[in-house]
Image: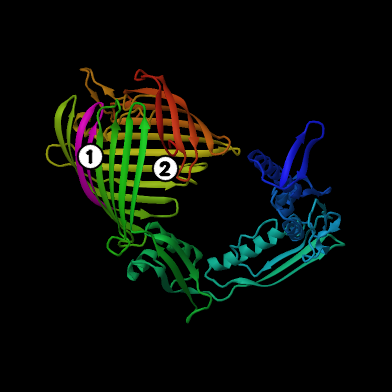
Amino acid sequence: MVIFRRNPQHGRRVSFRGGTVPGRHITRILSAVLIWGAAATIARAAEVQLRAPDADDALLRQLRAASLSIETEADTSAAPQDILAAARADYARLIGVLYGAGYYGPSIRINVDGREASEISPLNIPTRIRTVRIRVATGPRFVFGQARVAPIPPQADIPEDYAPGQIARSELIQDAAAAAITSWRDLGHAKAEIGAQRITANHANRTLSSDLRVNPGPRLRFGTLRFRGETRVREERLHEIAGLPTGKVFSPDELDDAAERLRRTGVFRSVALTEDAGIGAGNAQDITAEIVDQKRRRMGFGAEISSLEGLGLSAMWMHRNLLGGAERLRFDAEIGGIGGNSGGEDYRLSARFDRPATFQRDTDFFALAELAEEDEPDYFERRAQVGFGFSRIFSDTRSGEMAVIYRYSEVEDDLGSRNFSHLTFPVGYTIDRRDSALDTVRGEYLSAEVMPFLAVGDSESGGRLTLDGRAYRPLGERLVLAGRFQIGSVIGPDARDVPPNLLFFSGGGDTVRGQPYQSLAVERANGDRLGGRSFIGLSAEMRADLRGNFGIVGFVDAGFIGADSVPGQDGAWHSGAGIGLRYKTAIGPVRFDLAAPISGDTGDGPQIYIGIGQAF
């Protein structure tokens, strides 16, 4: 048995004796074992030094980032064989960094406890490694003596720095080769490749000569598209959705677009389109698509809360591939205003059916139905609508939608009880260049909608126009400036002849934070309150990343509601400002905003808003 005794004069000693170990001694033994284990672990961590006297700060950072030995210095569990393997691998890794910076005559010495790492046999690894010393002599920097890639088509975008006299960075050679191949593939030469290359370094002249010979191969056309994988979607529908132009000249962009159309349906968990290795009869490039279905059914839930508007709950249920043609059927249910002071509770139940690739590969058909009840501060409305339409994807950033929708509503407000019946024709167009919809750092977003409404029965006809523009600009690595501009107008009938849901109100989380929900409306001489026929919304945010997943936001919002159709006339403004906290998650940042009014006479103290995703 091992017994630990403490002597005030001599410190801790170890003695051995037979017999039973008392409980207090077991505790001492375990403590000592843990201390010794930790000390042994710390002792195994090798000290690593990297010196490159001729390197500038940027190159030194690249060398340190590439070194596996430096990574092992922070790993106290690294065994000697791990440290030695890292040191031996560093020769190639550091040379790669130096070649990438244009240094083709470097000297790299890596000493492991005084011995060159490359000379230590992997079969005779030391039992302990204490130090790793890396010394890099960059040598002279080389420039291109010759920089040639041929043949290339006129539109080839070869890097400008791939030219005689420029620093001979190795990645420029790779970029030039990739650009040459891409240019030929864009012209239909799917099998273009680098046929031969000659790269030589002249150490006397400190020049590097690069000569790349391109083999374009024949011009090919799209051949057969074959599908493989686990899917319930009918094959003819797969071809319709992919829309690969069989018989047309091969194009990498067309291949990417076909894969994106399949992904866009939301039916597939994975989609991969690859070119077959061989060339088919008649210079055909056959394509194989590997696809795997998503689960057929999906459910989702959401929640949002504000101090004035109360709690909002939402749920959805979706069925993918409803009829075997990648159709989707989705039901949404929402309840808002729970426990709030913004009227009563609001209810909405909706259904939407989508069928991709209808009439044309980038055009989807949809049908929708909705039942809603809105108990707002200035009106109560029951609404039903049903309709159909088409959505179209024009490019990666541009899309449009048009529909025919019949809507019927029953309204109670300051003007009494009224019924409205309209046939509407909404047409929308969206440009979305944001890098992320939930947490944008850079880009622009613009959405515009024109909706003529035709009276059915005793209602009035007119039109409604809305525009929503947003811009995002990064300021350094941690700051983002975001701005939003909204404008709307109802043209034609007087406000009393328009369903309140189509008029405009301002205040609340979607317009002006810090102002009570829909607190700004049109005040008539007799005291009646109605929605406005025009609206302007302005918002600005400064977003800053803090440590970890946390961020902070400062914001200011302003809104205008007017009685006239022309925005900015015959109306009033109000505004609010505040500060917010963000916590980033996989589904977007959790948002907590605290805001207060700063102008206008609709304010009612500070407001709190909590939700998922940025405010805009």
Q: State how many labels appear.
A: 2
Q: Nearer the viewer, residue 16 or 597?
A: 16
Q: Position of residue 235 (x, y in %)?
A: 34, 70
Tell me which residue sits at (87%, 62%) in the image: 204
- Residue 159 horizontal side relative to residue 324, left or right: right
Image coordinates of residue 599 in percent, x first then y, are: 41, 19
The residue positioned 46% from the left and 71% from the top of the image is 288
Relative to 139, 378 lies left or right: left
User: Can you tell which mark lies on residue 81?
Assistant: none
Mark 2 is surrounded, within 10 Å at the Cα level, by few (under 14), some (14 to 19) or many (20 or more) other residues, namely some
Tell me whether circle 1 and circle 2 mark residues in contact (CB < 8 Å): no
Q: Amino acid at mark 2?
A: Leu
* Label 2 SS: strand
Residue extending furthest toward the front: 19
Is residue 383 rendered magenta in the image? yes
Q: Provide the residue designation for mark 1.
A: 372
Q: Which of the 4 image quarters holds residue 122?
A: bottom right
The residue labelled by disc 2 is 446
Q: Residue furthest left?
A: 457
Instruction: Depth check: give the residue in front, 586 or 383.
Output: 586
Colour logic:
rainbow
Q: Is residue 98 above or below residue 239?
A: above
| Residue positioned 85% across, 58% down in the render | 115
Instruction: Tell me which amino acid carries mark 1.
Output: Ala
C-alpha gap between disc 1 and disc 2:
28 Å
What secondary structure do most residues of the magenta stretch adopt?
strand
Residue 440's x, y, as percent? 49, 42
Residue range corresponding to the magenta coloring: 369-389
What residue lies at 79% left-to-right and 54% top-to-bottom?
A: 129
